[in-house]
Amino acid sequence: MQGCNRSQKIAICTVGLPARGKTYISRKLNRYFNWLGYKSRVFINGNYRREICGTECNSQFFDPHNETAQKARSDCAKMALQDLIQFLKNGGDVGILDGTNITRERRLQIESDLKQSFNGIQTLWIESICNDSKVIQNNIRLTKINNPDYCNVNSDEATIDFLNRIKMYEQIYETITDDENLSYIKTINVGADIIVHQVYGFLLSKIVSFIMNLHTYPRPIYLSRHGESQYNVDDRVGGDSDLSELGEMYADKLADFFFKEFPTKETKNEIIFFTSTMRRAIHTSDVVASKLDIQPLQLKTLDEINVGICDGMTYTEIAQKFPSDFQERKINKLGYRYPRGESYLDLISRIEPVIFEIERSRQPVMIIAHQAILRCLYAYFHQNEIPEVPTLDIPLHCVIKLTPAAYFCDEKRVLINPQTGEISIKEEYVQEFVRSKSKQKSFIDL
């Protein structure tokens, strides 16, 4: 992130029939880029069409022989593209055009408009192909019939109408071919097969790797800090201290919690368990692993933020010995790098491979690590703005259970009393579709 040429503009354009996961991929990529620190934004053709033409457009509106509707949809798509271009001109790094773009003529026009607007822009086309009827039906059921187009229509009628809409698009659908001379990725049947053509460069190569790890299988992700350490008691930063007495109690109660979450041997064997190489995390993880009879994978990538020469100090001591550093950290906690240590931006770069592993996994994932690490991971899944990362609330003795879905992420916080084992639960529902849509309205000028 910090070593790339940020003057390079990138446009990503989706291709494919409705209900093929284009918006899912667009939102995932947008979240990933913003988490890395790039200025990224999604421009959804359908949102423009709803704003201009309303939400009561049935399948006949998408008939390619309906010239009036065809012109209206084309005008909306052009507006989306122009807003994307303006976003990149105003300092954006990555613009994502989420639309069907199913004709060769349309793709070549977009490519031409982008090249005329920018010298040397990189354009990547992502075509999502799906021939699995079960996947398509499931996508329609989970996302499409709940979108604003069908807010006053029962689910059966909505499904029939949407399937008819797909048939309208199928009449003119042209898959990307090599003679269009485009850089493209084709993902087939939710990543079962991937074709990559003429994709070059640092960031575009990362996109390929990222997409290869995507899937739509729901699975829980458990995040927990280690039990209270002796340094937590002393209010010291860094170090490799072991657990306090209270921390040892939490490790026992945490093991009991996970034993109830995964009551059978079969479910326990499915768990993918990551922890750091620091004593307080290893000690906590070993207690859990022993109870569940599983083996955690220790990753140095998950070690706490490196505080450099401030290791072992209290914040009071840091303020006294390094007053300028202490003040700089207060002003810019995100970008501040401890002397001979790391910043939160460094952490995000460091744990990127862990994000890939989590995205790739189709089994439950359990991570026992540290506050700064879990803040970065949590921010990725909840699409927090990068400046929010250093202040996210990741308390001790709490399990955060995340269940990502297509356009939302369920969250359950389980607070565990280390002494009594008493559990209190707080549930939240963060719907990315709604959050992103509300942000969309702030930059569409209609």
Image: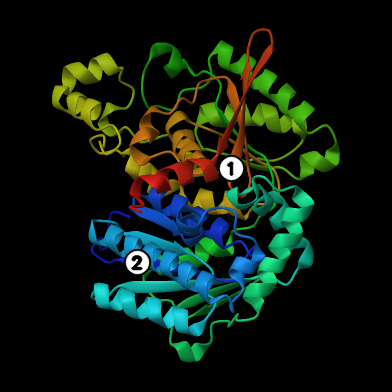
**Quarter of the image that includes the N terminus:** bottom left
Relative to 311, 228 lies left or right: right
Name of the residue lying farthest toward the bottom: 179
Q: Give whichever of discs 2 and 1 has the lower sequence position.
A: 2
**Above or below for 257 versus 23:** above
Relative to 78, 121 lies left or right: left
Colouring style: rainbow
- The reply to whether residue 326 is in sight is yes
Residue at the spot x=42%, y=33% of the render? 372
Residue at the spot x=53%, y=14% of the render? 244
| Residue 408 numbered tag | 1
Q: How many angstroms separate mark 2 from mark 1 (CA)?
A: 26 Å
Relative to 73, 118 lies left or right: left
Label 2 sits on what residue type? Ile
Depth order, front residue of 422/17: 17
Residue at the spot x=50%, y=88% of the render? 178
Q: Which residue is mark 2?
A: 10
Label 2, residues with CA under 10 Å away: few <14, some 14-19, many ≥20: many
Q: Quadrant of residue 398?
A: top right
- The reply to whether residue 189 is in sight is no
Label 1, residues with CA under 10 Å away: few <14, some 14-19, many ≥20: some
Residue at the spot x=72%, y=54% of the render? 158
**Above or below for 129 versus 358:** below
The spot of residue 412 in percent (x, y) is: 63, 28
Label 1 sits on what residue type? Phe
The spot of residue 50 in percent (x, y) is: 51, 55
| Residue 67 numbered tag | none
Name of the residue lying farthest toward the top: 420
Could you say whether the residue bearing mark 2 is in a helix, strand or loop?
strand
